[in-house]
Image (cartoon, helix red, strand yellow):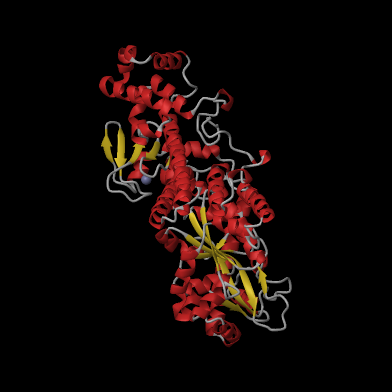
Amino acid sequence: MAAHNRSVPTPASDDAFAEVKAKVDLVKIVQEYVRLTKRNKDFWGLCPFHQEDSPSFHVNPQRQSWYCFGCERKGDVFTFVELVEKTDKRGALQLLAERAGVELKKLSPEQKERADSRRRLLAMLKLAAQYYEYVLWSTPAGEKGRRLLAEREVDEAIARRFQLGYSPAGLGFAEYLRAKKRSLADAQDAGLLRRDGNDFFAERLVIPIRDERGQPLAFTARTVRTDEQRKYINSPETPAYVKGRVIFGLDLARDEIARRGHAVLMEGQFDVIAAHKAGIQNTVASSGTALTDDQVRLLKRFTDEVLLVFDADRAGRQAAQKAVLLAAAHQMRTRVATVTGAKDPDEFLRAAGADAAKQWEELAAKAPTGFEFGMEDAAAGLNLSNANHVELAARRLREWIAQFPATLQEDYRERAKRWMGVSGHLLAAEPDERRSMSRQAVSGAGMNGLESVQAGKKVTVGRYLLQLLAVRPVAFDRVRTKITPDELDEEDRGIYIRMLETYERGGASGLEMEMAGYPAEEQDLIRRAWAAPPPNVDEEVAVELAERIRLDHMRGRHSGIIRELSEAERGKDAERVARLEAEARELFRAIIDMERRG
Ligand SMILES: [Zn+2]
């Protein structure tokens, strides 16, 4: 018998996924987290991913797939474990492989060597963090570090939470390693020692950069000397640490992020420390770089919304806009808070003293959405009663909007129009900015199984759904829970209602019996669908079509409300404005939610 291999599989392990999937039973895995009840062949339970009182979480054992009718999350056993364990695909594979006793693909000697060296580095980094922390609090050499913390108003309790430490001058760490009979070479590889054995971070306050599970991967270190040019230095990249993949403070913030439903992203480590001290414990920082793709992906495992806090200067505003776009590309919602009257959040929170949490709440409450933030920035310094300025602002807004995912652009144009009070054509997309096709035509993007429908054929989503229902009436069971007839276009509504009634009376074979009583053009549509069925008549596709129709309907309603709102504003009808604004906001949120899940 081969030994059980616990190391992470190589990237090219599609086989491993297939093998593990074949050996585990989704129902059993889900049952470890959710109480399931069997109904016919399927299982139902309370969804672990959203709050609910009646079960809408559905597991299909034949297909080994799950779907929640409430929050519309879905997937297979890997997706389930990913979400429920807040891990990634590899992590899910690892967990499931262990549970199922599946041996993951053997690593090559090279890969094994790399994995071993990474393990050694991680152990060394952990040891270093402990050593620095000990020096800071328990030795005379730590005095300089303690003084710096006192200046920064960081008390011992909060410093220990972040495991701050102090690296003394000289050969302190090397001697410590020798005494413990540990490898100096490993410490050099981990970026902790210079070639001469001197401590890399000598005479600096050391801040561990830990992963989301609390394992130190690197350090950033601030000098305590006034004559030192380089205020901060960072660990080099190592097999254990890739810059731009770690989020500082995530290990401490993750529970609070889940509880509050959003993360607060700041720039500096001391900002995060001050925030946690002030009780804003869902705060993290993108460490060492501007926010990266990998960091957004990591954050998205914990939340869909992030409040960005950047410095109020130009560089800060630009960084904020980049972060907004990056987050939007990953379907994350953003808001942007600007700290005023202080150079950074650390200073702001310290100046507020005991009042910090309250002042922070006020600041956060005022934060515009990421889109609005960029919109305000585009028009900053311009006089919108001057025609030239209006044109310039409109051009900047067009550019801003064009950088968002296509699904958001139409709504953003609507909002920009309303906000600026300019006529529509100024904000209409330029031909080269136009990425999305006509809203009513079926576009392949994002619609499973629909790629084969050419937009050129002008099959509307509604028509496609009707054809599908004609061929596969049982799909009504799902579709009717998704949409109401009034969400369909007028021309599709009549036949939809008729077919639904037929199905309710006569089941799957009802249509053949009752069709003779249908208007001629409806009979025609049904016959043609039977003769040449649409490319995919899967129930999942039916559900997607229904959701798409629903979304279009919501977007239409939203635009309508926005129009009505302008009217109400002109009429100075404050009560109606407030009501419409609330309605628009709610609807917009629902739209974003749907788009996110789609
Ligand atoms: Zn759910």
Query: Which residue is found at the position 54% from the left and 54% from the top?
Result: 419
Q: In the image, residue 138 lies at what x, y percent?
A: 53, 84
Residue 105 position by quadrant: top right
Please tell me which residue lies in front, 326 or 238: 326
The structure residue drawn at horizontal position 46% and vertical position 65%, both measured from the top left corner, is 365
Observer able to see residue 154: no
| Callout count | 0
Left or right position of 560 against 216: left
Q: Which residue is at a point 65% across and 53% down the rendered structure image?
A: 390
Observer-nearest residue: 150 or 587?
587
The residue lying toward the viewer, choosing from 101 and 295, is 295
> Is 186 placed above or below 517 here?
below
Ligand 1 image position (quadrant): top left
Q: Is residue 72 visible?
A: yes
Residue at the extreme front of the image, as rendered? 571
Q: Position of residue 397 (x, y in %)?
A: 62, 51
Q: Is 410 placed above or below 245 here?
A: above
**Spot occupied by residue 389 in the image (x, y as percentages of width and height):** 67, 56
Q: Residue 472 occupies which quadrant of the picture?
A: top left
Q: State which quadrant residue 542 falls in.
A: top left
Asked if residue 392 lies left or right of residue 179, the reply is right
Residue 238 placed where, x, y %? 65, 60
